[in-house]
Image (spheres, rainbow, N blue to C red):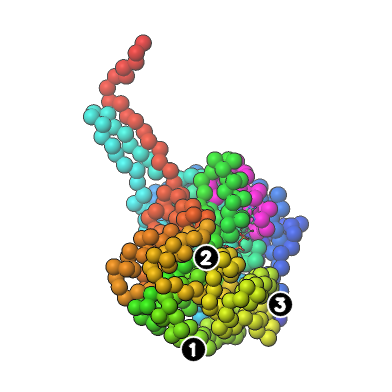
């Protein structure tokens, strides 16, 4: 069987595909069938050196262009991505197993949004003028240099663009290492950027496991590291970056609370909880996996939720009708199955799901546990799969305190028809990306990122510019220098 996914080569360096089969082979598995659809090779030290040297060499020239010129390339790349949305979405589906119904709507399109948005901003990035009597200071907004992006496997195209677009807009070079689980999509992003006119070396992609990522983070030529991944990896990468005093953006995991009050619109609340737990088979960092439901609405909520989950179309992800696909890998499926067993063993009430689906590929049933207690493992740890934990609450104060009793702080949501309560509650929740009567929207115009253990820094929005540039202040004396001797 041939798939349209076999990459031209494993790496994209200095404007072209590069192969080195001496690297450790990485099998690319289609999650819906378990079949191997491609092989890439982890970067050898020679490839890592080639990628870093090319980025370092090219970056100064890219930074010397005007912002408008850089932005034009990004905006052209955005247009190409939109034109090729279908092919890129099919590839994303092969890489991740996510249904085409999702990938056609959110992956290449959100990548294109980032390229368009930061392409538009590039021409207006400035420093400022600060008058001090007759003297003055001006600031120059300068790129950091070579930035490294390290991706997770759930949104490979989006992550490659969310990191690349602001980095390139500011005049940096980006060296991106995708997750070893989903290595294909970022190569296409690199290809398209170069087709759009990006100079060679400004966006390189190399493959590899954690050790390749680690070798990039510790290289003195690298000025910044942006990681999307788990908290344990984040701790390692942040520590390694600190040793070289490098800038970081950390987009890490979560166990986010979603608070549903008695007065919420039931169907909207159920819809929000579905989006926040089962989209992408639950493999979304910002998911609201601790669903606190006020006692008065609880049974109605569970009933409606179960009815609506029965409408999920589970099947071939390439079929447009499919709305629920497999887990990304056998490994991730087994991790989630272990959590499901723990939930059962801890005495949570299994409302629906709870089993592997009997078909080829890595499919799990959408799973809901009710009567979950705060100290259960399924209420404390990030599962990263289609497993919702429903917890009861009575008062607003109690729900807020329990929602915040976690080391994570990525997202939080509230469903209520009382506007004052919506804003009052959200203001007290310790999270970076929050929602009132909605869940998991991530427009490029809004900052995205976490607090507490969920991360450092923000992606998207104007704020990302501060994470990919720094200010040089220049004091200009107009008169004589008065020295004491
Ligand atoms: P992971 O932490 O296992 O791996 C992430 C990336 O880090 C991979 O590319 C991996 O090769 C690399 N890596 C591993 N060890 C490294 C090291 N020592 N040095 C440098 N790089 C290293 O995460 P995953 O399993 O790929 O993704 C799932 C996790 O990502 C979940 O915790 C999820 O919440 C999180 N996530 C966060 C966001 C966000 O924006 N906050 C988005 C998506 C996923």
Residue pictured at 49% horizontal, 66% vertical: 256
Looking at the picture, how far across and down is residue 269, in whole percent? 41, 78
Pointer 3 with pointer 2, Cβ within 8 A: no
> Of the residues under marks 1 and 2, which one precedes in the sequence?
2
> Of the residues under marks 3 and 1, which one precedes in the sequence?
3
Q: Which mark is residue 392?
A: none
Q: Which mark is residue 255?
A: 2
Quadrant position of ligand 1: bottom right
Q: Is residue 336 visible?
A: no
Examine the rendered structure and indicate whether residue 24 appears above or below residue 225.
below
Q: Which mark is residue 307?
A: 1
Magenta highlight on residue 458: no
Q: Nearer the viewer, residue 266 or 125?
A: 266
Magenta stretch bounds: 204-225
Q: Is residue 416 visible?
A: yes
Looking at the picture, how far across and down is residue 244, in whole percent? 58, 40
- Element under disc 2: loop
> Of the residues under marks 3 and 2, which one precedes in the sequence?
3
Q: Nearer the viewer, residue 382 or 213?
A: 382
Q: Nearer the viewer, residue 132 or 189?
A: 132
Residue under numbered circle 3: 35
Magenta highlight on residue 223: yes
Q: Gap between marks 1 and 2, in whole Å?
A: 25 Å
Q: Decide: few, some or many residues near mark 2? Use Cα within 10 Å; few <14, some 14-19, many ≥20.
A: many
Looking at the picture, how far across and down is residue 57, in whole percent? 56, 44
- Element under disc 3: strand
Examine the rendered structure and indicate whether residue 468 appears above or below residue 329.
above
């Amino acid at each position: 069987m041939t798939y349209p996914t076999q990459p031209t080569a494993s790496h994209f360096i200095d404007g072209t595909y590069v192969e080195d089969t001496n690297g450790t082979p990485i099998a690319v598995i289609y999650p819906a069938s378990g079949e191997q659809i491609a092989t890439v090779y982890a970067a050898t030290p020679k490839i890592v050196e080639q990628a870093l040297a090319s980025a370092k060499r090219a970056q100064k020239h890219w930074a010397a262009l005007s912002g408008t010129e850089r932005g034009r390339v990004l905006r052209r790349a955005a247009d190409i991505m939109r034109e090729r949305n279908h092919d890129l979405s099919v590839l994303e589906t092969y890489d991740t197993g996510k249904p085409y119904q999702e990938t056609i709507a959110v992956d290449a399109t959100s990548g294109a949004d980032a390229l368009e948005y930061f392409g538009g901003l590039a021409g207006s990035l400035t420093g400022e003028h600060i008058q001090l009597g007759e003297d003055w200071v001006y600031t120059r907004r300068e790129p950091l240099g070579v930035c490294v992006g390290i991706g997770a496997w759930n949104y490979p195209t989006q992550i490659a663009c969310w990191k690349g677009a602001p980095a390139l807009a500011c005049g940096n070079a980006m060296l991106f290492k995708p997750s070893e689980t989903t290595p294909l999509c970022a190569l296409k992003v690199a290809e398209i950027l170069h087709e759009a006119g990006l100079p060679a070396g400004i966006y390189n992609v190399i493959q590899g496991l954690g050790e390749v990522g680690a070798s990039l983070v510790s290289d003195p030529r690298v000025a910044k590291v942006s990681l999307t991944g788990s908290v344990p990896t984040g701790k390692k990468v942040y520590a390694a970056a600190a040793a070289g005093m490098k800038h970081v953006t950390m987009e890490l995991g979560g166990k986010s609370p979603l608070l549903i009050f008695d007065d919420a619109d039931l169907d909207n609340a159920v819809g929000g909880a579905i989006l926040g737990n089962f989209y992408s088979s639950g493999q979304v960092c910002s998911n609201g996996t601790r669903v606190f439901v006020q006692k008065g609405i609880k049974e109605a909520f569970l009933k409606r939720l179960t009815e609506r989950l029965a409408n999920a179309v589970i099947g071939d992800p390439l079929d447009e009708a499919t709305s629920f696909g497999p887990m990304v890998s056998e490994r991730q499926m087994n991790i989630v199955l272990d959590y499901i067993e723990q939930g059962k063993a801890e005495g949570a009430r299994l409302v629906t799901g709870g089993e592997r689906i009997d078909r080829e590929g890595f499919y799990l049933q959408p799973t809901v546990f009710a009567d979950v207690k705060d100290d259960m493992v399924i209420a404390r740890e990030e599962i990263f799969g289609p497993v919702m934990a429903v917890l009861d609450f009575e008062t607003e104060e109690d729900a807020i305190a329990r929602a915040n009793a976690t080391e994570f702080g990525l997202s939080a949501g509230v469903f209520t028809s009382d506007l004052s309560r919506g804003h009052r509650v959200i203001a007290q929740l310790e999270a970076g990306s929050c929602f009132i009567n909605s869940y998991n929207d991530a427009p490029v115009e809004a900052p995205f990122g976490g607090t507490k253990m969920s991360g450092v820094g923000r992606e998207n929005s104007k704020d990302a510019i501060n994470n990919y540039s720094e200010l040089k202040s220049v004091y200009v004396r107009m008169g004589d220098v008065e020295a004491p001797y």
